[in-house]
Amino acid sequence: MTNLQRTAVLAFLLTPMLGYAQSWQDTVAERTSAIETKVVAIRHDLHAHPELGNREFKTAAKIAEHLRALNFDEVQTGVAHTGVVGILKGRSDFPVVALRADMDGLPVTEKTGLPFASKVTTQWRGRETGVMHACGHDAHMAILMGVAEILAGMRDEIPGTVKFIFQPAEEGAPEGEEGGADLMIKEGVLEGPYAPGAIFGLHVFPVPAGMISYRPEGMLAASDGLSITVKGVQTHGSSPWAGVDPIAVSAQIINSLQHVVSRQLDLTTAPAVITIGSINGGNRGNIIPEEVNMTGTIRTLDPQMRTDVHARIKKTVRLVAQSAGAEVDVEVHEGYPVTYNDPALTARMAPVLTRVAKDGQAIVAKPVLGAEDFSYFANEIPGLFFGLGVAKDGVAPGQSASNHSPYFYVNDSALPVGMKALSHLALEWLHDASDTP
């Protein structure tokens, strides 16, 4: 056999090995293209029929029906009230990777004028309100339902199992109820025979359609509530020396809290925000009231800084009140933790995001001080949460309606990018974890 013949035979034998990774990528691309129109229709239907947290009954039924029609190995319903979990086995049971989408809408009356705009109304805290997918959860669900269809048709190319998590109540459970990712974890969604080794999720944002944004470590902030009650001594407004003015004390507290951020924190580590959003006290201009109530929010991107800020807030509020002779109650209500992207996982998957983003636009973004309860999942197992741009074509940067706006818009052209991103992340991770070529 000549050297040329030996080279030809070797090339023939190596071709399947060299081309394997590309083959599943091609399959994902082909299947994504084939169902794009269907997924857009799914999103429009979900958008037109939003439901609030822990009440996503019809939404959950649609998702479960979709997964069963794809012959998923298991479809669990009623998880954390209305959540749906699907198990899709590939050519082996393990390893296991999880993909997550949130399901709930917001108490927002839609003003987009779209033909599939929500006309749903409901009672929210004793008042009638519209309901809208004003944060893009309809897109999240439609994308993940599309991924379910893509991967269900290529089981022989999946070296493990994919767990699909459709989570209710990301925007918060109704008062007096538990819900969301935290409750799903308590109910064992990350445990059992198909415990995932990693989890991926996405969120749509009003930036150029098809762009992907991500960052290692803190991607979105911890969100904690703040309640302060200042108790003074009521007196006539003409003789403030006869009492203790809780309004004046509250003003000093508000100013001093800003010094916590600007003068006591190392902001080169991570940004932080303390905002007082409401202040209520008194009912007449000539009466110094007995009490003032304030509420606010605390946003941090570093877990250690979060703990430090809470302690500094309590100390500052108490000392300011004490200096004026007032009494004070201060409570920090811990909410969602920092959405933390595992650095090693992020570094490994960054090329994947570049590969699938429109025109390769996958950027390391600035942190966002909004919050997401995907953070609970990522606190338990390595996670990667990334942003997907969905802005309307031709709209100048910064001019799109923000998430939670009644005018929030999702560009359907971004849905295939989201489907490919989650499909590629799941398959890439499973190939790595199973040590297959």
Image (spheres, rainbow, N blue to C red):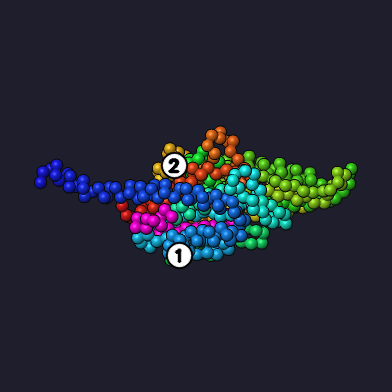
Q: Residues within 10 Å of mark 2 (few under 14, many from 20)?
A: many
Q: Residue 105 appears at what percent x and percent y?
A: 60, 52
Q: Which residues are magenta?
A: 149-171
Viewer-proximal residue, 295 or 236? 295
CA gap, disc 1 and disc 2: 31 Å
Task: Kindly give the residue lying farthest to the front in the view shown.
Answer: 115
Secondary structure of the residue carrying numbered label 2: loop
Question: Is 309 left or right of 74, judged from the image as shown?
Answer: right
Mark 1 surroundings within 10 Å by alpha-carbon count, few (fewer than 14), some (14 through 19), many (20 or more): some
Hey, what amino acid is under mark 1? Glu
Query: Was residue 158 drawn as part of the magenta stretch in this picture?
Result: yes
Residue 234 in sight from this viewpoint: yes
Residue 210 screen position, x and y as percent: 48, 41
316 in the magenta segment = no
Residue located at (71% from left, 54% from top) = 128
Residue 156 in percent (x, y) is at: 34, 58
Residue position for label 1: 74
Using the image as rendered, state which of residue 281 and residue 356 is in the foreground. Answer: 356
Looking at this view, is 41 or 26 the one in front? Answer: 41
Tell me which residue sits at (82%, 51%) in the image: 290
Q: Which residue is more in the foreground, 421 or 315?
A: 421
Q: Residue furthest left?
A: 1
Residue 309 seen in the current view: no
Identify residue for label 2: 357
Q: Amino acid at mark 2?
A: Ala
Residue at x-position 58% and y-position 48%: 116
Percent coordinates x, y for residue 378 in the rendering: 50, 54
Direction from residue 228 to residue 236 in the image, left or right: right
Instruction: Write the residue at 70% across / 50% down.
Output: 295
Name the image quarter holding residue 177.
Answer: bottom right
